[in-house]
Amino acid sequence: MEMDNNLDYLFGSMEIQPCSSTLDQSENQDLSENKVTLEWKKFVEELQEVVGYKFKNVNLLYQAFTHSSFHREDECESYERLEYIGDSVLNLLIAKAHYFLYLDLAPGQLTRLRAANVDTEKLARVAAKYDFHKYLRHKKPLLKGQVEEFKDAMLEYPLHSSGLIDPPKVLADVVESLIGAIYIDCKFSMDITWQVVENLLQPMITLENLETHPVTKFYEACQRNGWSVKLIDTWEKTGEIEVFAGKFAGKGKFSGKKLIALNRAAHNAYCEIVKNLKTTCDNYNCNEAQD
């Protein structure tokens, strides 16, 4: 992305026709009433308050909330390039924080911990928490329903589902694009960006509450007990996958993604093992995962 004076984006709003002129960064610092709409000012003010950061170039904020399905309506770029840089910045920020927080933690565990704090579900939860989808300019008619369904599913798994629910990827994307916009706007200051990111990502997943993936937990239980695993895959027809180990079985159903169906089958089988063998559940949510 071209920086600073080469950043020329178009003003507009979510509900009205955008302004036909562009502003450079110096003009952007002195917004006047005849160049922006009341709706646009409200959009900026609300988001800056939610995020806890005041933009010098508010056009970056505007771009960060413009989906590719919408950006052809005007000359404003979509958030995809900001998302690209935001993803990289976020991974480095989390890696740095964990490196100094967990001085004796092995690289493999550091990688798992970082992944849990930057994956699609974690970032989608951030967007859902702050209702970022309400500010997103897009032409995705199904998004509202997907977000509502995701929010309902979040109630069962307050911190993270470890692959048992399906987060709308666009929610995670907009968080990464926002981080990218902040990073560019603050002149590439990792410290300033981290102050905002650390607050947005609360509650963070820590070493103490990091859960093992349901498939891993299931296979580890099978190995401890010397059980072979059998899988019956009827997902293409029914959206279901069944797993068997010893006398235990688990069924998972999710027609949207096969991987989630498999995760749910492993989760349900593992919970049957825990319940019947009276082993520890390691604070794992052993309610049966449903479609």
Image (cartoon, grey):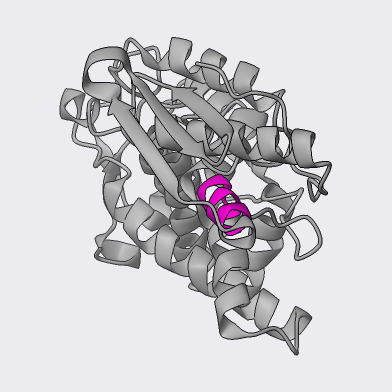
Question: Horizontal and vertical percent for residue 6?
Answer: 25, 62
Magenta-colored span: 213-222
Measured along the vertical axis of the image, is residue 108 above or below residue 65? below
Q: Residue at x 70, y 63 (%)?
A: 195
Q: Which sits in the foreground, 167 or 82? A: 167
Residue 220: image quadrant is: bottom right
Question: Horizontal and vertical percent for residue 1?
Answer: 25, 63
Outermost left residue: 72
- Asked whether, in this view, residue 265 is left or right of residue 106, the answer is left
Would residue 169 be counted in the magenta stretch?
no
Would residue 217 be counted in the magenta stretch?
yes
Magenta portion: prevailing SS class: helix
Question: Horizontal and vertical percent for residue 132?
Answer: 55, 30
Q: Residue at x 57, y 53 (%)?
A: 222
Q: Residue at x 54, y 30 (%)?
A: 249
Q: Which sits in the foreground, 88 or 183? A: 88
Residue 237: image quadrant is: top left
Question: Horizontal and vertical percent for residue 112?
Answer: 57, 66
Does residue 29 appear in the picture of this structure?
no
Does residue 256 appear in the picture of this structure?
yes
Q: Which sits in the foreground, 217 or 223? A: 223
- Asked whether, in this view, residue 169 is left or right of residue 2, the answer is right
Measured along the vertical axis of the image, is residue 180 above or below residue 290? below
Measured along the vertical axis of the image, is residue 152 above or below residue 70? above
